[in-house]
Amino acid sequence: MLGFLRFLIIGFVVMTLFYGLLTVYVRSLTRERLEEDWEKEGSIGERDAYVEEGIKAYERSFRPKLLLLVYILPLIVFAAIFYVTNFL
Amino acid sequence: MRYVKWTLIALIVLIVGGFAHYTLPQHDIVRIVNTYEERQDISGWTTMFWQEAGNGTANQQSRDVQFIQAVRPNGKSIVYRNEDTGWGWPPYFKFDTANLYTEANDSISTRAAPEWVSVTHYGWRSELLSVFPNAMGIKPVAGPDVTIIPWANIIILTVLFLFVVTLYRMWQQFRQRTIEPLVDDVEDVLELADEKKDSAVDKVKGWFRR
């Protein structure tokens, strides 16, 4: 039981760490893309306002929620390994 | 300096490669000849080649361990241990040790009428250190010459590679977008300070020229 708890806690901490890193990384990529888009569209209007609006649109969209797969995929992998090892 | 660098790189490759080779699953095609249980007094640094205590089956460093004896097609012998990995490392989540022991006993065959099986295992066999690979699964195969495609290893190593690439890309992005602008700012400030100093020096020089 203690081993299970340790596994759960370590797993959760590692996944959360990776989730945080991915969140920051993808937002940074989005920001970079928005900055490039602003230039491509002919640098019309305020650059920061354009980027901030784009970031807000990104955060409202479904894409950041996809990052929750960081929690779901390892769970599926765990279930698969557990099944293959013990019941196959 | 070059030697130091290459020694370090070789060492890292050796450690990572060795770790992967020890931990990842492998398939042996063998004929199982016997199983036995033996009391093991596990101590010293080779403890890390055994499952840790407290996996539900063992609570101490002196315990009975199940073994599976087998013979390879070339006649050489190989002995596996049969231990739960439980929730510990490596993450195989093996709890069916007793079932595997039954399967192993069910697969025993003689030299005259061999029944070949593929034993999935991880770990190394070292006669010198009394270290045994841990058997994970037993599957009957058609003969001693069948080839088994290591799908699990292909998938694990691919995912691991993608993971490392992602981490590297993250670091690159962080450096490009966060560290470099910061460094540029600092450089600007330093340059400004330098100019100020220069002008101050000129001023002082000007005083003396007068």
Image (cartoon, rainbow, N blue to C red):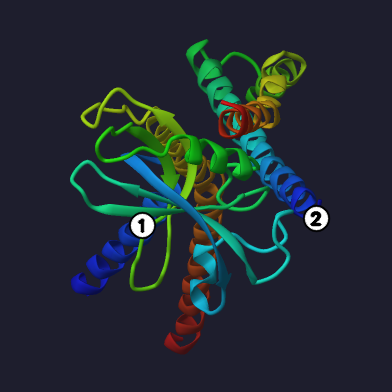
Q: Is residue B25 visible?
A: no
Question: How many angstroms separate mark 2 from mark 1 (CA)?
Answer: 29 Å
Residue B158 higher or lower than B111, as above or below:
above
Q: Amino acid at mark 1?
A: Gly
The residue depicted at 36 percent of the width and 33 percent of the height is B117
The residue that appears at 50% across and 85% down in the rendered structure is: B207
Residue farthest along the top direction in this orientation: A41
Q: Residues within 10 Å of mark 1 (few under 14, many from 20)?
A: few
Residue depicted at x 35% and y 48%: B70
Relative height, residue B188 to residue A37 (above, below): below
Q: Chain of mark 1?
A: B
- Give x and y (percent) for residue B34: 42, 49
Give the structural element (helix, strand or loop) at label 1. helix
Task: Report helix, strand or loop for mark 2.
Answer: helix
Chain for mark 2? A
- Asked if badge 2 and badge 1 are on a common chain, one would say no
**Residue on which disc 2 sits:** A2
